[in-house]
Amino acid sequence: AKERGEGGYQRYRPGSEAPGAERRRITAALTAALERDELVLHYQPVVALPEGRLTGVEALVRWNHPERGLLGPGDFIPGAERTGMIVPLGRWVLREACRQAVAWTAELGDQAPGTMSVNASARQLQEASFAVDVAAVLAETGMDPRRLTIEITESTAVGGGATQESLRALRAMGVRLSLDDFGTGASTLSLLANCPVDQIKLDRSFAPVPGPDAIAGAVLQIARAMGVEAVAEGVETSAQAAKLGDLGYVRAQGFHFARPMSPEQIAAAISEPAES
Ligand code: C2E
Ligand code: CA
Ligand code: CA
Ligand code: CA
């Protein structure tokens, strides 16, 4: 029997499809999605605390599936990673995000989101050509490298020689690096000491809870000691926003401020700020 599964492709009950067949099916579906231009980026504002002013956005990919509607990354990124399709998919995400950032600047001037954060998977950083591909996209779109932040997870950051070479090359180009989901990895502190990043994103599982709450504050102290920027993500309530502001956080992201939005919604929110 069929079940709805990852990627909006039909998933069969375990055992009923050979791994090779599954890989070919996912590869074909994602190749078609790229060819038909079915992927879209939504953008979630990153704001300055305490006032909530927009400072940048994070690009988050969705698949506008012709039959199944808008699929979130959890439905197809794991399959893209398993099959290697994350490489062309990620290249599309990077180019589209940079194109949009430059277009917003032309349209909105100083009001445009300053920074563009793009997620990259381990598999992409392992490509020897990753930094060269990024440089090509920056040149093609006219994007200022200093406005681009590449978000990687801790498990990506501990990757081998090709990964380390990619990270070094990106920073040499002026691209900023962010450690995503900070605090959830196995080797957080030794990693931070050894991996030159510009930003850490406090994982949303550490967003403040009512009552005494040490982790968000401790992570900010570590970030300061290491000279990296700290962003709190997954901020859902005004109480959390206030507490983070009191702790000294100056950057945050979360449903409390704004959900991921289409590019049109972002531009509208900037040019027609919500009445207060
Ligand atoms: P992430 O990088 O940690 O992105 C943040 C996720 O948290 C997004 O989910 C966002 O919608 C959600 N989020 C934001 N604020 C809140 C909040 O206040 N509360 C809660 N509960 N959630 C919040 P989304 O868009 O479903 O993305 C999930 C993950 O998929 C991302 O996690 C990232 O790891 C991955 N992803 C998204 N786009 C890309 C991409 O272009 N390339 C790669 N490689 N991975 C991507
Ligand atoms: Ca991220
Ligand atoms: Ca995250
Ligand atoms: Ca994540």
Image (tube, rainbow, N blue to C red):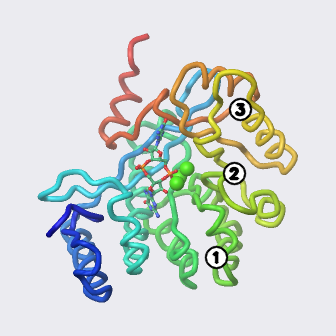
Mark 3 sits near ligand 1, with its Cβ under 8 Å away: no
| Residue situated in front as seen by the camera: 65 or 155 | 155
Q: Is residue 176 left or right of residue 138?
A: right
Q: Nearer the viewer, mark 3 or mark 1?
A: 3
- Name the residue: 51% across, 59% down: 119
Disc 1 packing (10 Å; few <14; some 14–19; many ≥20): many
- Name the residue: 69% across, 32% down: 250
Could you say which disc has been placed on residue 166 in the image? 1
Q: Nearer the viewer, mark 1 or mark 2?
A: 2
Write down the quadrant of residue 187 in the picture.
bottom right
- Name the residue: 35% across, 52% down: 41
Label 1 close to label 2 by CB (< 8 Å): no
Please give the residue where the numbered disc 3 appears in the rendered image.
Answer: 249
| Residue situated in front as seen by the camera: 25 or 106 | 25
Three-letter amino acid code at disc 2?
A: Gly
Image quarter (top left, top right, bottom left or bottom right) of the C terminus: top left
In the figure, 266 relative to 163: above or below? Answer: above
Q: Is residue 188 left or right of residue 12?
A: right
Residue 117 seen in the figure: no
Disc 3 packing (10 Å; few <14; some 14–19; many ≥20): many
Residue 167 seen in the figure: yes
